[in-house]
Amino acid sequence: MRERRGLENLLESFLFGARWLVAPFYVGLVLALVILLGSFGFELYQGVVVHFSLDPETVILLVLSLIDLSLAANLIIIVVFSGYENFVSKIDTHDNTDRPSWMGTLDFSGLKMKLIGSIVAISVISLLRAFMELAKSGGELDSPKLTWLIALHLTFLASGVFFALMDWIGSKTEENNKKHHLKPEV
């Protein structure tokens, strides 16, 4: 019996320590953030220095591209911080006043909702950019491309609604279970 408990403790320690295998993924995402920053800088340089234009459509397209990259960067930060804190270890910021208020409070369900919300926002910006380019060129309509963009956006949107609905149903079920399992006060 005693040997089994020791083996069980060893196995549980091994499994618990395995969470650190996820940490390199978050480091990789931080490196992807650096690459995204380079892309942001290049896009800004191209728009302001190389293709400088005060044409409203061109400026709007540049701004939409920069917003798109910014949303992707925010998405990476959300995944890195909340993923690391939920699955690896708590981040000790030494009570830094700049610590985001959602850090340490965003659970897996909240992370899913933030992810799908960001994906929908990125999708709608890509769709808007495609329509702006169409209006700017004043010409050919790439029907299959626009159809795919709209279909993907609607798919992301529907996924977000279904995720929210599943979380709402789950929270109501949890509330109901807690309500029925409470012992009456004496």
Image (spheres, rainbow, N blue to C red):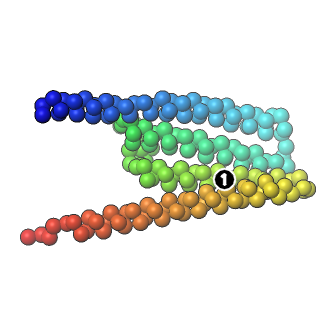
Residue at the image point whose x is 42% and y is 44% from the top: 103
Residue at the image point whose x is 77% and y is 48% from the top: 61
Where is residue 90 drawn, in percent x and y? 36, 37
Where is residue 162 drawn, in percent x and y? 52, 62
Which residue carries the number 1 mark? 123
Q: Nearer the viewer, residue 68 or 185?
A: 185
In the rendered image of this protein, does residue 17 appear above or below residue 107? above
Is residue 6 shown left or right of residue 40?
left
Element type at mark 1 = helix
- Quadrant holding the C terminus: bottom left
Is residue 179 visible to us here? yes
Residue at the image point whose x is 60% and y is 51% from the top: 119
* Amino acid on which the number 1 mark rests in the picture: Ser
Residue count near mark 1 (Cα–Cα under 10 Å), binned few <14, some 14–19, many ≥20: many
Instruction: Identify the image quadrant of residue 135.
Output: bottom right
Where is residue 27 drawn, in percent x and y? 50, 30
Q: Nearer the viewer, residue 158 or 125?
A: 158
Is residue 65 shown left or right of residue 89?
right
Q: Nearer the viewer, residue 91 or 167?
A: 167
